[in-house]
Image (cartoon, helix red, strand yellow):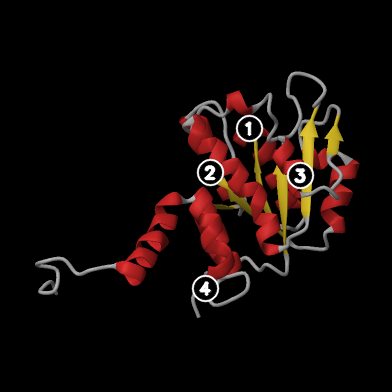
């Protein structure tokens, strides 16, 4: 056997954290295009609903300039109580947040937040120190510059945090298109949040339903 052990995300042992993705902090996420990043945070939030994962949501000083979480997040999880931190920069320093994570009963944590180098990194490193396996959705964590993002991701990676894309997280949780959730549940979500892949499905549907082979196509290898 090789020296490397591949730990895969398991939908039965994973929890989702939505950390400080607040309306007032959104403008600090300047390392991604603003439209792209808005899409990414909504995609991250919906992972919990798709795979029926326990969800922990937390804000930092939301009655001040940081603002609240988007209403859409709250509507996705109306029974989840938001951990409203009043001072702790590192969410793990907040006892209510720690208890909420522990109450999920899961050992694998998927996390994203604003900003990457502080909110996401501090919590991810603390979770690793507490014995959790951590997957950081790098597309849904934003910060002020690309350089700062990359350094923060390197710091987390050095501590054993796995830095993944949204699509990689979804595919690891799903594992097989024939599973549930699988193709039937995932394609509509990808059509909203990963349109390049959604259009693959749309194109295939169109070809099957009414496609006509064009001149010259039949002879292609």
Nearest the eye: 131 or 35: 35
Quadrant that contains the C terminus: bottom left
In the image, which is nearer the foreground, mark 4 or mark 1? 4
Residue of label 2: 139
Residue of label 1: 115
| N-term-proximal mark, 4 vs 1 | 1
* Residue 149, position as x, y percentages in the image: 52, 35
| N-term-proximal mark, 3 vs 1 | 3
| N-term-proximal mark, 4 vs 3 | 3
Q: How crowded is mark 1: few (under 14 residues within 10 Å), some or many (20 or more)?
A: many
Q: In this view, does 191 lie above or below 126?
A: below
| Badge 1 element | loop
Q: Residue 200 is drawn in which quadrant?
A: bottom left
Q: Which residue is drawn at 64% across and 55% down?
A: 47
In three-dimensional space, the C-alpha distance between marks 2 and 3, rounded to whole angstroms, equals 22 Å
Residue of label 4: 177
In three-dimensional space, the C-alpha distance between marks 3 and 1, rounded to whole angstroms, equals 23 Å
| N-term-proximal mark, 2 vs 4 | 2
Q: Which mark is residue 57?
A: none
| Badge 2 element | helix
In the image, which is nearer the foreground, mark 2 or mark 1? 2
| Badge 4 element | loop
């Amino acid at each position: 056997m090789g020296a490397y052990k591949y730990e895969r995300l398991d939908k039965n042992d994973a929890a989702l954290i939505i950390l400080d993705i607040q309306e007032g902090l959104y403008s600090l996420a300047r390392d991604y295009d603003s439209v792209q990043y808005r899409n990414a945070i909504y995609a991250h939030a919906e992972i919990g609903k798709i795979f029926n994962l326990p969800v922990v949501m937390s804000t930092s000083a939301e009655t001040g300039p940081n603002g609240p979480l988007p209403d859409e997040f709250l509507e996705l999880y109306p029974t989840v109580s938001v951990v409203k931190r009043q001072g702790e920069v590192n969410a793990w320093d907040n006892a209510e947040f720690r208890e909420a994570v522990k109450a999920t009963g899961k050992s694998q944590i998927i996390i994203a937040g604003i900003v990457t180098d502080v909110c996401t990194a501090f919590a991810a490193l603390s979770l690793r120190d507490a014995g959790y396996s951590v997957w950081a959705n790098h597309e849904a964590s934003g910060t002020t510059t690309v350089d700062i993002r990359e350094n923060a991701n390197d710091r987390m990676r050095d501590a054993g945090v796995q830095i993944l894309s949204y699509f990689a997280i979804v595919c690891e949780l799903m594992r097989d298109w024939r599973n549930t959730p699988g193709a039937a549940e995932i394609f509509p979500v990808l059509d909203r949040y990963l349109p390049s892949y959604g259009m693959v499905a749309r194109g295939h549907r169109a070809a099957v339903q009414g496609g006509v082979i064009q001149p010259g196509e039949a002879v292609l290898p």
